[in-house]
Image: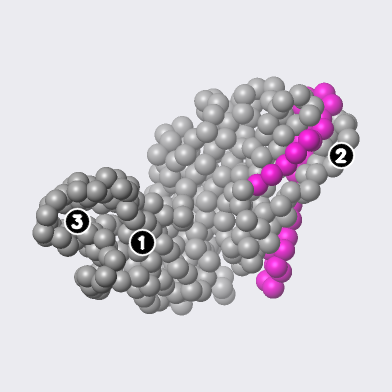
Amino acid sequence: MHTLLLPLLFLALPGDGPLVAPAPNADLGEVKSGPALKCEFELKHSETRGSIAITGVMSACGCSKLNVDRKLLEPGETAKLSVAINTLTQPEGPATWTCIVKYTHDADPTVRELVLTWKAKIVREITVVPPVLALSTGGDTARSHAITVTDRRATGGMTITKATCTNTKVTLDIRPLKSADTGTTQAIAVTIPGDLPTGSHDDIITLTTTDAACPELKIPLKIAKRAAGDVSVSPESPTVRFTKGQAEASVLVQLRAAGKPVSISKAECKQDGVTVKFSEGSGPAATARIVVNSAKAGAVGQADVTIHLAEPAGAVVVIPVSWYVP
């Protein structure tokens, strides 16, 4: 994978802070999905006095990884900010990303911000469904879920040769490669063991391929393991499935509590474009419909839906939902 170096425009414009970087809205051109999009920014201490301390770097995109190789700069010194973006979670077409560098100057303790923005056009040739595997599970029974990798390039033929996970309790089984008119597909079975500890687990699945242009694919794995006896959800990790041209789609989930009455008092999601409707009243099961508007939520994504229950009193269920527009 090649690193894209953004052009450096150190312009000391009036009102600029002592930390300078490339101009915003850098255009990285056309980027193929599959390999991570990597680029570098150079940051420079542009003044002749004092030290700059970089206190943080953040991005609104959870699919990006940011790293600064130096946190303290003397006059004239530079630091390198490396950015890596998971293209598998990006919708096809134009995309824009922004990151904020927070820093202080020892002559002024005020925290200042340097905003960097860049854009690219994503061309989706390699897809992974789901691009983020979010699972909710409970009990002591092992559960399996599938990841499907599709290569739509004319050359095709990319084969997954190895699959590993940062959580060593998770097992991965690579299925045979299949060919079709639309390209090649290969499935990987992901098995969550029944003895996985309760709580939240954030891990990464890495798929090694035979393709020199795309040697690795990385899929975030998020697991919420419930304690025995907790409220069960079916499906545990719902996926909202769109058809081409469809702007809004939904999925229905059902909640049960081992034969005890269940009723929902509130349901919410912090992700724009994701809404929840739920049944009123008490009964052996409660239902909630999760609705995704792709124009607001994006063509591909994952979010947590939080459901507060009146029965069992005080119970809260977090349901990871994912969606993908073909």
Check disc 2: other Cα within 10 Å, few if <14, some if 14-19, many if 20+: few
Q: Name the residue that disc number 1 marks.
A: 115
Looking at the rendering, in which quadrant would you find the C terminus?
A: bottom right
Q: Amino acid at mark 2?
A: Glu
Q: Name the residue that disc number 2 marks.
A: 280
Q: Amino acid at mark 3?
A: Ala
| Main SS class of the magenta portion in the image | strand
Select label 1 or label 3 by which is in front: 1
Disc 1 versus disc 2: distance between alpha carbons? 46 Å
Q: Determine whether 27 is above or below 172 in the image.
A: below
Q: Secondary structure at mark 3?
A: strand
The mark found on residue 294 in the picture is none
Select label 1 or label 2 by which is in front: 1
C-beta proximity under 8 Å, tags 1 and 2: no
- In magenta, the rendered stretch is 240-269
Q: Secondary structure at mark 2?
A: loop
The mark found on residue 79 in the picture is 3
| Residue 70 shown left or right of residue 258 in the figure | left
Q: Determine whether 307 is above or below 17 in the image.
A: above
Q: Residue at x 69, y 22 (%)?
A: 229
